[in-house]
Amino acid sequence: MTLVANHAMRVPSSENIHFIQVSQGFDVADNEIVQRVNTGDLVITADIPLAAEVIEKGALALNPRGELYTADTIKAKLTMRNLMDTLRSSGVQTGGPPALSHADRQAFAKQLDKLLSQHRII
């Protein structure tokens, strides 16, 4: 597992966990992820534009609520995200996503387990 962020993080010491700290800046971490991702990799992100880019490179994208983005669904998600961004830029109060619930965590764990089992990672 590789974690990428533009700020320091405490990461458990493990030969299977790697941390890459990138410089501050717009999409610097996202660009690093896209540069490093390979076909079949799994990227966990709530960032829809990032998910679209990794899917384009043949990777899988899973959000923290357990939704697996696919080539069939990502375009609609990206269109809706861009519409909401335009509304917010125009001053419309759109609110944000609800807090992560217990059901969200369970859905994520179930989907992650399914993906790992399918790819024989466990």
Image (tube, rainbow, N blue to C red):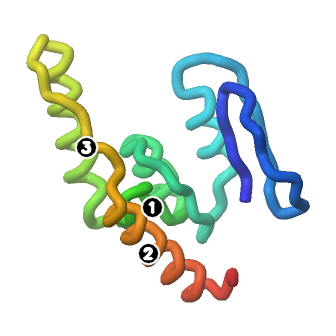
Task: Identify which residue is drawn at 62% across, 33% down.
Answer: 29
Identify residue for label 1: 62
Q: Is residue 2 left or right of residue 92?
A: right
Q: Nearer the viewer, residue 37 or 1?
A: 1
Distance from the alpha carbon under mark 3 to that under mark 1: 18 Å
Q: Indicate the secondary structure of the residue bearing disc 1.
A: strand
Of labels 3 and 2, the one closer to you: 3
Disc nearer the start of the sequence (3/2): 3
Distance from the alpha carbon under mark 2 to that under mark 1: 8 Å
Q: Are marks 2 and 1 in contact (CB under 8 Å)?
A: yes
Distance from the alpha carbon under mark 3 to that under mark 2: 20 Å
Residue 84 place in picture, x, y as percent: 17, 31
What label does residue 25 carry, if any?
none
Amino acid carrying mark 3 in the image: Pro
Count all numbered tags in the image, as a single digit.
Answer: 3
Find residue 91 and report its image quarter.
top left
Amino acid carrying mark 1 in the image: Leu
Decide: is 27 above or below 111. above
Amino acid carrying mark 2 in the image: Gln
Q: Is residue 50 left or right of residue 32?
A: left
Disc nearer the start of the sequence (3/1): 1
Identify residue for label 3: 98
Task: Identify which residue is drawn at 78% across, 46% down.
Answer: 11
Q: Is residue 99 left or right of residue 63?
A: left
Identify residue for label 2: 111
Task: Identify which residue is drawn at 53% across, 20% down.
Answer: 26
Q: Nearer the viewer, residue 70 or 5?
A: 5
Q: Residue furthest top?
A: 91
Q: Is residue 122 left or right of residue 89?
A: right
